Every structure is written in C-alpha cells, then in structure tokens.
Amino acid sequence: MRGSPTDPSPSARHRRARRAAGAVASAALLLPLLGAAPYDGAGRGSAPSARLQNAFAEASARYDVPQSVLLGVSYLQSRWDDHAGAPSVTGGYGPMHLTDARTAIARSTAPHHSDGEDARGDESRGTLLPEARIPEGTRLPARLTTLTKAAELTGIPAERLRTDAAANVAGGAALLAAAQKQLGEPLGDDAADWYGAVARYSGADDTATAATYADDVFDVIRRGARRTTDAGQRVALGAQPQLRPVTAQVRGAGLRAPAAGETECPATVSCEWIPAPYEEFGDGDYGNHDLGDRPASQSIEYIVVHDTEGAWDGVLDMVQDPTYVSWQYSLRSTDGHIAQHVKAKDVAWHAGNWYINAKSIGLEHEGFLTAPDTWYTEAMYRSSARLVKYLSRKYGIPLDRQHILGHDTVPGTTTATIPSMHTDPGPYWDWRHYFALLGKPLRATSGPKGGLITVAPRYERNRPVFTGCATAGEPCPAHGSSAVRLHTGPSEDAPLVKDIGLRPTGADSTTGVNDVGSRVSTGQQYAVAGRDGDWTAIWYLGQKAWFKNPRKQPTAVHAAGAVVTPKAGLAEIPVYGRAYPEKEAYPEGVPVQSVSPLPYKLLAGQKYAVGDKVPGEYYYAPTFDTTPHRVVRGSDMYYEIQFGHRVAFVRAADVRVTPSA
C-alpha cells in the first residue's frame, strides 16, 4: 500500500503478517543400529588440555572411523568447540554438532521484523510492519534429530551426548560408521573411502549440498588445522595434502538431484532457486520486492549480512509470502546450503533503508542474535564467504566493513527511524573469522602513526558483558564477541558514550545486547583521537570515545587511509542516513525526497574514516507497474563514512579529504 507525504494518492497502511514457521520433513537417511556397547568415557587420566584430542582417538578406535575424518567433520561443524553444552541455532550440540532440535529450539522465536523497522525504508510506500506467529509442534526433518539416532547407536543417554564432549564425539563416530556400513563401504583407516559417509553426515537431502559439505571436510583434512577450543582443549589435525577421496560414493547415497533454477551462485556452493513472489494483491498493493535492472541502472555497492531470527523451513515460508519482505539469499546452518530468492538485478526489501536496499544484496543466515550460544556453524560461515567473494568479484564490491555491512551497521533514514533500526547479526557474529575466510584477514596496514585503527579483538578472548539475551537486565552468558565497548574516558569506570539518535533525551547507553550506541565492531575503521596508556580514543558520533587496547592483547591494529573533516571555516556539518539527490534533480512525476540530516553533527577538528564517493541517487519504484520507475541521479556528491556503529553519509561539498596520518 502507498501512503506518505510524498505520495499524491495515499492509501491505508498495510501491516504485514509473518507466515507460520512450519517445518517440512527432509529425506535425510535413517541410519541402522551398530549394536555398540554403552560408552563409558574418553581421555581419562590424560592432561586436561588433551582430553578432547584423546576422545577423537578413542572414538576412532572404537567405531573404526579414521581419526582424520572425525576431526575434519567436527571442525567443519564447530571448529571443535563444545559451547559448554549449549545448542546451535539448529539445535546442534557439542563438537560433532549432534542435533536435537525438539529439545533445543522447539519454542517461539522473536520475529525478524517486529520491532518497528520498515524493512523497505522508503517513504514513497506505506510502512511494512509484519507480525510473528510461530506454531507449536512443528514436524522436524531428520537432519535436525541426529542426536536421537546417536543415542540409539551408542547407548549413551541423550543428555550426556548434549553435555559431555567426549561422548558427543563418540556419537558422531557412530553415525559416520553407520552411514559407511549402509553404503556398503569398508570401515577402517583409509580416509579416502569415507567421502560418501561424510556426505550423509551433512544431513542434506540433495547430492549437490552433500557433496559440497564433503568437499569442505576433505579440504580441511588436506590442509590440516590446529587450535585451542573455547574450553581450553588443544586439538590438532595433521595435514594430508595427497588425500584424494572416492567422490563417486555420493551418487549412490539415495539423495535427490539439486533443485533446478537459474541461481546466481559460485560453483563451489550448493544453491537452489526458491523464488520470492512478485505479486499484486488487494487495493493495488504488491510484494515482496521491486524489479530492477542492476547493475546497468544503478551499481550494487553493498552486501548486507543478516540473521534470520528463525529456523530454516519457517524462513523459507516467510520469503515466499507476497505480503512479507524479502532478501536475495538464505543460508542454512547445518550444512551451508544456500537458497536464492531474488535476482541480483532486482531490489529486495531487507535493510530498512531504501538507499541501501536499492544498492545492496541481502544475505540471511540461520541464527539468533540474542542467543550467543546458538552458534553459527563453520559450514555456514564458509558457504557465506564463498558466496560473498563471488558477488564481490561479479559486481566489484570491496571486501571491507564499509561495503560488507551488518544489518546493525545500516543507518536510519531519518531521525525518527534510528531507534527502530535492526541490530543483527549482533555482537556474536565472528567478523574476524569471516574476513579471514573472505581472504581479507584483519591485519595492521601501518605503524602507530597511521592515524586510523581497525577494530580486531581476538574473538574467543574478547568477552564484554551484555545483558538482556533472555531476560531484560539479566547478564547474557559469557561468550566470545566481535564487539568492543566505548567509554567517555580512559577507564572502565567511565560512563559509556551516549547516542542521541537512540536516546534523544540524553539517557545513558546500556550494556543491552541490542544497544549499539556505545560499541564498535570488528573490522570497522576509525580515526584515532588520543591515547592514554592501554586506552585508545576514536572519533565516534561527534565525540571522543575510549576503548581498552592493551599492548599485550590488542583490541585494534594500526591502519592508514583517508579521512574526512569539515572544510575550513565550518564549525560543524550535518550527517545523513542516505545519499539522496538535490531537489533540482527530480524529473516531473517523481516526488522529491527530503535530504533530512540525522541528529548528529560532525564537528571541526574531528576525523572519520572515509569510504566511497557517490552521487546522490534515488530509485523511485512505488508501484507494481514498472513503467513509472526511475533512477534519479543528482550532481551533489557524498562520502560514506564510519561515523558511529553504523555508517553514514556527508556531502562532499562540506568536507575535505586528507590522509589519516
């Protein structure tokens, strides 16, 4: 529906309704019992930090599964972490990610777009505010109930499989051995014979997804890996560069062919076409995206990383609802499988800022931002990174935090929209690991006089206190994080910096998990404003903000680059949430969009890291009929800057650009 001051024929607003998150049973294979005796523990008597490594060795011997295969599968699922027995977003427990979704996630979840944000973010159309309805008693696919099967195979109680890492490894080994037997392949030490069993372990029901998963596991085995887990366990997998698995095994695994469709995905991922509907319905309304001609009509500048706040089948249900919103791709947690819904040339409604929507591609990852232990799997991180690298090459999108945005770094369009902007994927998305997978590891690019810093804490060691994950005001579980908190002075006792956009009355920022007013995120760059011992100050939202940055465990690394500052003679300049054209650029029939500044000011003497220089641009697309659609491009130029937690824009005419040093 239409309805805004700029629309000459407004109609009533339309409140979107989210579809029920019904689950669809998959064709994942059930595994036969092995008749194994009950498991009685692993690693007893070993050094505390070696118990998990010994558990892999004992499970390997007990179930006649190559230790390298066990380690490779576990690394792809959890990077060997056990998350203190907490389940992943898909109900997966422990190092082997044994799934028990009925226990873990059979609950109502927070709606993805229920807190006031208009996912489209354009005043030329009415606000889109859906409601959530999650039914109880959903039917779950077999890939979400592997822990139950592991309990049958091993005789280990389900609760122990959830909470005991060594038992969990044994459960995973039993599943792999059962799959190997069902395929008619030999048990034993030759890892090359286990490709088909690994493919089945993925839980995928199509050959492409299963093969992609198995390829990743064997890539891990060939390269080797070594790390200390979240529980302090030292685990190593020796490299086997000559390993060549028997890949033909996956063809006999009883899986369906991948879904047909014209997907835009790299060959290295499993991808299917599940289209979002472009349909017209009651009172001239339509959904759930707009047709476009990108990049011919306008460039694609951004990729926006979201989390779904819901489980896979329900998410697919939502994006196929014409009365809901849309995004280009969804990524599944268990195996990294990708579904594409909207073509890259078209404009999806996902970011809450129409300027960003018109120039971006949205990726939804199965996850929950306020549940730090509903961890994202390595399989999904890797699949996402491959997709982003592919899109980056195809559309010339730089791989940095001013172009690879979190939904939480998309700016509000106007002062009124700032409080309702979304905060996913949140402080528990591992940006440092993600950029390493993108081939752009976060490293120092200058000496201490570079003038900029790149936020880059060690995720596992960086554990700021957050509140409100489950209950308002209550502490969230201690957990690794990509976020760094900001204070008004070089002391942890100093107040947190304030965000007048979030709290116009001047109220204090909080440690709430959804409060982005006083924190920065890994990979973001800021201009240095001062140093005091172990503390570094940056320019942030028009003020000096301090964070702890000890030399022995640095929170940021030195960087060099360009910065913007107000032109000489200007005491302050406005900051914008979108780069719209000047009014003279609009042709007849296209309503002028206001270039309204946000409540912040960029003050003389302050500096901010600069991104692209872009022309003012607006995509007018308020109707189902594409005839009146126009791309309006002005002569006013803007710079994108890293202004606070979110990016922002300043007019090029207001600033000068200088090296940061």
Image (tube, rainbow, N blue to C red):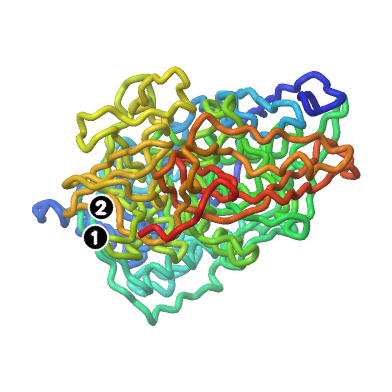
Q: Which residue is mark 2?
A: 229
The residue lying toward the viewer, choosing from 349 and 62, is 349
Query: Which residue sits at x=43%, y=50%?
Result: 377
x 38%, y 74%: residue? 222
> Residue 217: percent from the left, percent from the top?
43, 64
Tell whether label 2 touches label 1 (CB within 8 Å): yes
Q: Position of residue 506 (x, y in %)?
A: 41, 20
Residue at point 36%, 72% (across, down): 223
Does the rendering let one see residue 184? Answer: no
Q: In screen coordinates, is 32 left or right of 531? A: right
Point 49% across, 49% down: residue: 334
Q: Amino acid at mark 2?
A: Thr
Instruction: Please state the horizontal and vertical placement of residue 612, each as a whole percent of the image.
Output: 56, 56
Question: Which one is nearer the viewer's eye here, 307 or 604?
Answer: 604
Q: Is residue 314 visible?
A: yes
Work out whether mark 1 precedes mark 2 in sequence or the reverse, and give the earlier one: 2
Give the x, y percent position of residue 166: 25, 49
Residue behind mark 1? 235
Q: Gap in Å between the C-alphas at discs 1 and 2? A: 8 Å
